[in-house]
Image (cartoon, rainbow, N blue to C red):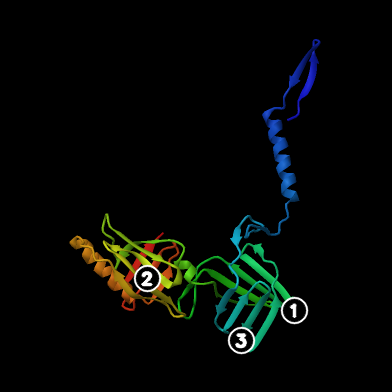
Amino acid sequence: MKRRTQAIDGRLSIKFPTVVQQCAVLMLHIFIIAALIPTSSVFCQGILVGPECQAFREPKLPFTARGQEPGWMITIDTNTIFLNTQYGALQLNMKRTEPQATAEGILYSTEAEGRRLEVFIRPEICADVATGMPHPYQVRFELDGQGHAGCGGDPNTLLTGGEWTVQSIDEVPVAEKSEVTILFMEQWRVTGSASCNRFIGGYRLTGEGLSFSQLGTTMMACEEHLSRQESRFLEVMKAVVRFEISPEGHLVLHTPDQRRITGHR
């Protein structure tokens, strides 16, 4: 902060800038800094920051996306972007460029042999139009200006990464002071609390849905109402055929006869 000095009646007086003057200087500094910052995306520790301050993490590579009508698939690895479209009639292998952040998410833009390919990836839940399987990314590509939409990323990443606390079973809220949880682990194992006893088993994800297998529990004696809740929970778990992630981020497990389990993190 600069000071101004002034002699008054032979005495030295020091004047400090007023609050208004200090604010004006600060605002000027902010405008100067903002003018020097580029509007393009910035990469910082794996996170892209876009022109409007959005933060997007680049998907883990290799990354695969698919769509329908016409059927297409895109695979992005560390060096290339491979496009298979028109049900396999057209295949292009292009150089992978550094990703950019846009208002839509992450953009890969590349050219080869006079053709331009842009791949837009946004971290939003996307349900496959054919199977209903949820994916962690919405994906759109444009080849020479012609665009198609689909879904990308590994659906398993939506299940793993933390324990789910069950809120309701068959639309009935979980009993007070009871704990029902589901934890998806590595090597396709699942565990948690069934109400009173612990359970463990396996799970499987296919292009069509989700299923559980070989579910077993400990053998502790339970209060009657918890025993009934536990039996209902395990019965529904064994019948699950698919899952979804709600707009609120809740896990919903579905059976063919419309039964379901709902949980949150």
Task: Check the image and name the residue furthest to the top.
Answer: 9
Residue 127: x and y in percent read 48, 73
Looking at the image, residue 131 sits to the left or right of residue 120; the answer is left
Number of callouts in the render? 3
Residue 199: x and y in percent read 32, 67
Q: Which residue is mark 3?
A: 86
Please name the residue shown 38% across and 73% down the image: 202
| In the image, residue 10 above or below residue 252 | above
Residue 173: x and y in percent read 29, 61
Q: Which residue is mark 1?
A: 112
CA separation in Å, label 2 and label 3: 34 Å
Earlier sequence position, callout 3 versus callout 1: 3
Name the element at disc 2. strand
Q: Amino acid at mark 2?
A: Leu
Q: Circles 3 and 1: CB distance less than 8 Å?
A: no
Figure quadrant of the N terminus: top right
Q: Which dot marks residue 253?
A: 2
Earlier sequence position, callout 2 versus callout 3: 3
